[in-house]
Image (tube, rainbow, N blue to C red):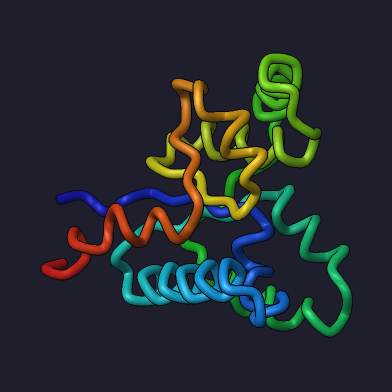
C-alpha cells in the first residue's frame, strides 16, 4: 500500500500548544502528535507549504520554536506558485473561505495529497463538496486510518 500523502494546515502544528483542559482540544492534540509520529516513522508523507511557513514565522515567539520542530517532520514543501494563487482565488469564490485557508487548500490540491488536515470545523464544512480534496479533522483521520498503519 502506498504511503498516504498528507497536508496539514497551521492549526494542526499549533494544536498541541492550545488549552488542553478542553476535551476536544485534548483529543485533537493527541491526534496531531500521532500524525507527527507517523511522519517521523515514514508511515505517511507530510507536506508543508510556503503559506504554512509564513504563518509560523508570524507565530508568537514562545510557540515558534516548537512549531519549527513540528514542521521539520515534513517531507516535501509546496511552493506558492501563480497556479496555487489562482486556484486559491477560485476556492475563495466557490467555497466562501478566507485567503489563508484557500492558500492551504490550493497547496494541498496542487500537491495532489490524499488528505487535507485541519482543526477548523467551518473549513471542513465549507470544503465538504470539493471534489479535488478530502478535508478531515485529525481525530477523524486517526479513527479512519489507524488500522492501515498497524502493519506498515
Q: Is 137 situated left or right of 21 in this image?
A: left
Between residues 144 and 134, which one lies in front from this camera angle?
144
**33 left or right, relative to 39:** right
Q: x%, y% of residue 91?
A: 67, 22
Which residue is rendered at x = 68% and y = 58% of the image? 10
Question: How far across and down, in percent of the image, does residue 30 sit?
Answer: 48, 76
Query: Which residue occupies 38% across, 41% down?
Result: 114
Quadrant in which residue 80 is drawn: top right
Query: Could you tell me which residue is drawn at 57 percent across and 73 percent down?
Result: 23
Q: Nearer the viewer, residue 48 or 95?
A: 95
Q: How many marks?
A: 0
Q: Is residue 70 left or right of residue 95?
A: left
| Residue at 52% in and 32% down | 109
Q: Quadrant of the C terminus?
A: bottom left
Q: Residue 12, relative to residue 9: is it above or below?
A: below
Q: Position of residue 33 (x, y in %)?
A: 49, 76
Which residue lies most toward the left here? 151
Residue 37, how many percent across, how many down?
40, 76
Residue 86 vertical placement versus 110 (above, below): above
The answer to whether residue 152 is left or right of residue 103 is left
Amino acid at each position: 500500500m502506498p504511503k498516504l500523502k498528507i497536508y496539514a494546515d497551521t492549526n494542526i502544528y499549533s494544536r498541541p500548544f492550545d488549552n488542553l483542559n478542553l476535551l476536544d482540544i485534548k483529543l485533537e492534540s493527541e491526534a496531531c502528535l500521532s500524525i507527527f509520529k507517523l511522519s517521523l516513522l515514514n508511515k505517511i508523507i507530510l507536506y508543508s507549504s510556503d503559506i504554512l511557513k509564513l504563518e509560523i514565522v508570524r507565530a508568537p515567539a514562545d510557540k515558534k520554536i516548537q512549531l519549527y520542530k513540528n514542521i521539520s517532520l515534513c517531507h516535501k514543501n509546496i511552493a506558492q506558485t501563480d497556479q496555487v494563487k489562482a486556484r486559491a482565488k477560485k476556492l475563495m469564490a466557490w467555497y466562501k473561505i478566507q485567503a489563508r485557508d484557500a492558500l492551504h487548500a490550493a497547496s494541498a490540491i496542487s500537491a495532489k495529497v490524499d488528505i487535507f488536515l485541519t482543526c477548523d470545523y467551518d473549513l471542513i464544512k465549507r470544503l465538504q463538496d470539493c471534489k479535488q480534496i478530502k478535508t478531515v479533522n485529525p481525530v477523524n483521520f486517526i479513527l479512519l486510518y489507524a488500522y492501515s498503519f498497524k502493519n506498515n
